[in-house]
Image (tube, grey):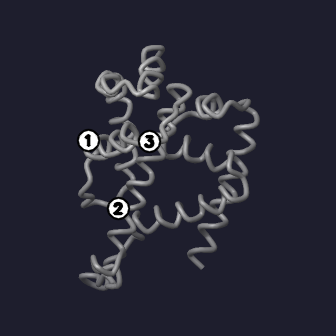
C-alpha cells in the first residue's frame, strides 16, 4: 500500500516510468472492480472488464490534472473514470445513430422485456448529478460505495469523514436517488 502511494507521488511529479510500476500493483484490484461493474450490465455487453480497466487507467495516467493524495483517492478516481466510461457507452448505445429511437419488439406476447441496464445507468448518472448539486459529499460517497465497491468504512476513510457521518450520508443519498429514479419512471 505504501508503494502505491509513493508511486502516485512520483507520477504526480512527472516521473514517466512510475506509471509503468503502478499498473502491476493496482491491476488486480481494478480488474475486480471492473468485473463487478460489468456484471450489472445487460447481456451482450461488448465492453470487457480488461478493456474497461485499461481505458480507465489510461485516462487516469494521461490526465494532466492528476493529483492523488493516497491509494484510496486513486481508486476513487479510477471508479469515477469507469463510471464515466460506462455512462458514455450507455449514452452512445441509445443515440439515434445507433438505433436508440427504435423500440424493441417482443418475439411473442408471453415475452416480458426487462428494462435495459444501460437506460438505468444513464438515469442513475443524471440523478447522481442532481445529488451532487445538493450534497457533493453524499454523491462522492455513492460513487465510492456503488462504483468503486468500497465498504462504508473504506469510503469514509477515503473522504476523510467519520463512519457515522458516512452512514448518515449514505442513508440520505439512497433515499434521494430512489426518489429521483422513481420520478424518472413516472
Viewer-proximal residue among 26 and 172: 26
> Which label is found at residue 89?
2
* Between discs 3 and 2, the one toward the N terminus: 3
Mark-to-mark CA distance, 2 and 1: 15 Å
Marks 2 and 3: in contact by CB < 8 Å?
Answer: no
* Between discs 2 and 1, the one toward the N terminus: 1
Mark-to-mark CA distance, 1 and 3: 24 Å
Q: Residues within 10 Å of mark 1 (few under 14, many from 20)?
A: some
Asked which secondary structure carries label 2, the reply is: helix
* Between discs 1 and 3, the one toward the N terminus: 1
- Across and down, in percent, residue 126 comes to 56, 65
Q: Residue at x 35, y 39 (%)?
A: 57
Judging by the rendered image, the residue that carries numbered circle 3 is 64
Report whether 125 appears left or right of 153: left
Viewer-proximal residue among 58 and 166: 58
Judging by the rendered image, the residue that carries numbered circle 1 is 50
Asked which secondary structure carries label 1, the reply is: helix
Q: Residue at x 29, y 84 (%)?
A: 105
Mark-to-mark CA distance, 3 and 2: 23 Å
Marks 1 and 2: in contact by CB < 8 Å?
Answer: no
The quadrant in which the C terminus is found is bottom right
Q: Residue at x 41, y 42 (%)?
A: 63
- Across and down, in percent, residue 116 comes to 39, 68
Viewer-proximal residue among 169 and 73: 73
Q: Residues within 10 Å of mark 3 (few under 14, many from 20)?
A: few
Q: Residue at x 76, y 37 (%)?
A: 165
Residue 20: quarter of image: top left
Residue 158: quarter of image: top right
- On screen, 54 above or below 128? above
Q: Of circles 3 and 2, which is in front? A: 3
Asked which secondary structure carries label 3, the reply is: loop
Amino acid at each position: 500500500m505504501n508503494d502505491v502511494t509513493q508511486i502516485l507521488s512520483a507520477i504526480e511529479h512527472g516521473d514517466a516510468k512510475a506509471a509503468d510500476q503502478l499498473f502491476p500493483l493496482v491491476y488486480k484490484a481494478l480488474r475486480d472492480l471492473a468485473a463487478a461493474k460489468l456484471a450489472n450490465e445487460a447481456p451482450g455487453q461488448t465492453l470487457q472488464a480488461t478493456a474497461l480497466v485499461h481505458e480507465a487507467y489510461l485516462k487516469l495516467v494521461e490526465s494532466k490534472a492528476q493529483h492523488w493524495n493516497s491509494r484510496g483517492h486513486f481508486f476513487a478516481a479510477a471508479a469515477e473514470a469507469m463510471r464515466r466510461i460506462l455512462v458514455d457507452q450507455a449514452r452512445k448505445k441509445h443515440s439515434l445513430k445507433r438505433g436508440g429511437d427504435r423500440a424493441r419488439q417482443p418475439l411473442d406476447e408471453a415475452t416480458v422485456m426487462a428494462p435495459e441496464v444501460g437506460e438505468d445507468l444513464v438515469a442513475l448518472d443524471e440523478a447522481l448529478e442532481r445529488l451532487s448539486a445538493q450534497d457533493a459529499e453524499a454523491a462522492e460517497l455513492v460513487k465510492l460505495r456503488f462504483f468503486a465497491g468500497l465498504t462504508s468504512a473504506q469510503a469514509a476513510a477515503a473522504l476523510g469523514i467519520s463512519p457515522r457521518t458516512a452512514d448518515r450520508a449514505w442513508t440520505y443519498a439512497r433515499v434521494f436517488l430512489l426518489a429521483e429514479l422513481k420520478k424518472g419512471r413516472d
